[in-house]
Structure formats: structure tokens, C-alpha cells
Amino acid sequence: MPESMLELDDVHTYYGQSHVLQGIALSVAEGEVLGVLGRNGMGKTTLIHTISGLLRPRKGTIRFRGRGIEGRPAERISRAGMALVPQGHRVFPSLTVKENLKVAARRGTGAQPWTTEEVVERFPVLGERWGLSAGLLSGGQQQMLALGRALVGNGHLVLLDEPTEGLDPQTVAKVGEVIDELRRRGTAAILVEQKVDFALRRVDRAVVIGRGRVVHTTDAPEQLRTDAATLRELLAVGGVAAPAA
Ligand SMILES: Nc1ncnc2c1ncn2[C@@H]1O[C@H](COP(=O)(O)OP(=O)(O)OP(=O)(O)O)[C@@H](O)[C@H]1O
Ligand SMILES: [Mg+2]
């Protein structure tokens, strides 16, 4: 049984009076990629922000590599080896592409650390925009840069919040290859996705979040991928997604 990378127990997060995460429990083992699915507004980003320290849970425990991190500042959690690719491709807009990658780069302890050269090889457009302010890149290019920043951070756990949102199919495929490569190198990750098929093809396990709770867990993502009835029930896939509460 591989050692636990991340463990959440009874995590509750609020925005003011609004009780969004209502007792989340989940775990990610070393080297495991966990898929997090769920319709719009169900609390996926709130979960990612709570894990990464951008939001403080009001109740519950979060253990990262054996240490309690709930309530710690995001900067400290990041330095402990957790990388975040935030939803909506956030990068430092006034820094150049090169500077964005440079400030994120860490040597890393893995057998096969990611280098900036490798990121540019995979996403050549970043090389073409090397000296340009990141704020001038297109949304898709900023997303590649955000992903590149997480890779060169060479952390223990990578959190990906809808990394393919708004990307053209070719770039989606490239992001898929990067996630497969992370998995091959034994880096643990959480992949939040609306593209259910894309996610279930490349994760080891998956959970579905519904109204701030884990409503479904599977160790057999491939099976869930082809179970149209369950997907429809959990995610309204193929139908119109329910609006946020
Ligand atoms: N800053 C905020 N203040 C108050 N409520 C918020 C805030 N951010 C999100 N919410 C609410 O919390 C709930 C969960 O939002 P969250 O962004 O976590 O959902 P999500 O699953 O990531 O959705 P999406 O798939 O659209 O990204 C929603 O009802 C949302 O309106
Ligand atoms: Mg979200």
C-alpha cells in the first residue's frame, strides 16, 4: 500500500455564511492521480483552494505528506511541494514567459525532474513568446504557461483545476499527454475536470462532488467512463448541467 500523499477528513469550508464544502473526506496515495468530477458550482474549485491554502477550512483536517496543513498560508504549502494550476489560467501578467517559468522552477527530488527546456519542447509557442509579458498571451497560451509553471516546480503533488477549459482540441491533447507523463513519473495529482471522458481515461481513481460532498467514489474509472446511466445521474452528462445552487 503506497504511503498517503494527501488526506482530507471532514473538511468544511464557508464563504461567509454560505456553507460550501460539507464534510469532504478523500485521499491521494503517492504516485496516484485522482479525478475530481462534478457539475458547475458543486465546490470543486473551493476544494482545490482549501487544499492549497487559498481558503481556510472552518472544520476538518488536511494532511499533506504526513503533516497537518489546514489553515497554513498558501505560500508555505506551495513551498512544501504542492503546485497549483488554477482554474482560468492565472499567471503573473507583468512578468515575461521566461520569468514566469524561472520564478516557479525548483530542482525537485524526483528521478526525472521537469526542466524549462522540456516544457518549451512540449509547448513550443512558449519559446516563441519567451520575452513577452505573459499578460499578452492568449488564454490558451497562458494555460500552457500555468501548467509549465506547475511542472518545473517539481513538487510532490500537482493540483489541476480544469486545465483544458477553453483550449482547442490539439492543445487539450497535449495537456493530456503531460498528465499521462506526470503519472508515468510517479507524481501524485488531482485532476478537476468537466471533460469527463478525458479525465476518466487517465486517472487511477475518481470522486464525484455534489453540493460540497463526495457523492461517488470509484477505483475503476474506466468502468465509470462507459457507464452512461451512472454518469447521467451523477453529472447530467449528455443533458443540460444543472445551474449552481
Ligand atoms: N468567492 C465566493 N464567494 C461566495 N460564494 C462563492 C465564491 N466562490 C464560489 N462560491 C459559491 O460556492 C459554490 C461552489 O463554487 P466552486 O467555484 O467551488 O464550484 P466548482 O465546482 O468549481 O464550479 P465550476 O465547475 O463552475 O468551476 C457555488 O455555489 C459558488 O457560487
Ligand atoms: Mg471550478
Image: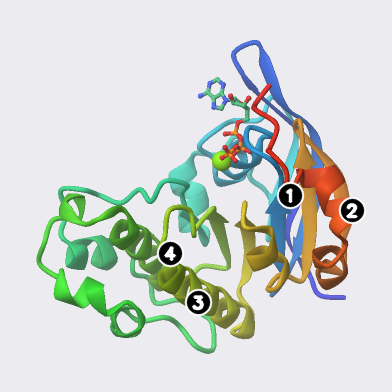
Among all residues in the image, which is located at the extreme left?
131
Above or below, 70 relative to 199: above
- Tell me if residue 9 can be seen: no
Residue type at mark 4? Ala
Q: Which colour scheme is used?
A: rainbow
Query: Which residue bears the numbered disc 4?
Result: 150
Q: How crowded is mark 2: few (under 14 residues within 10 Å), some or many (20 or more)?
A: few
Q: Are marks 1 and 2 in contact (CB under 8 Å)?
A: no
User: Which residue in the structure is indicated by mark 2?
Assistant: 229
Find disc 3 in the rendering and name its residue: 178
Which comes sooner in the sequence, label 4 or label 1? Answer: 4
Quadrant where the image shows the C terminus:
top right
Residue found farthest to the bottom: 111
Q: Of the residues shown, which amino acid type is indicated by label 3? A: Val
For marks 2 and 4 on the same chain, the one whose residue lies earlier in the sequence: 4
**Viewer-side label of 3, 2:** 2
First of labels 1, 3 by sequence position:
3
- Neighbour tally class for label 4: few under 14, some 14-19, many 20 plus, Cα within 10 Å: many
Query: Who's the residue at 73% across and 66% down the image?
Result: 200
Label 3 – label 4 distance at C-alpha = 11 Å
Which numbered disc, 4 or 1, marks the residue closer to the eye?
1
Residue extending farthest top: 17
Among numbered discs 3 and 2, the one appearing first in the sequence: 3
Q: Measuring from the top left, give residue 170's x and y in whole percent.
A: 42, 73
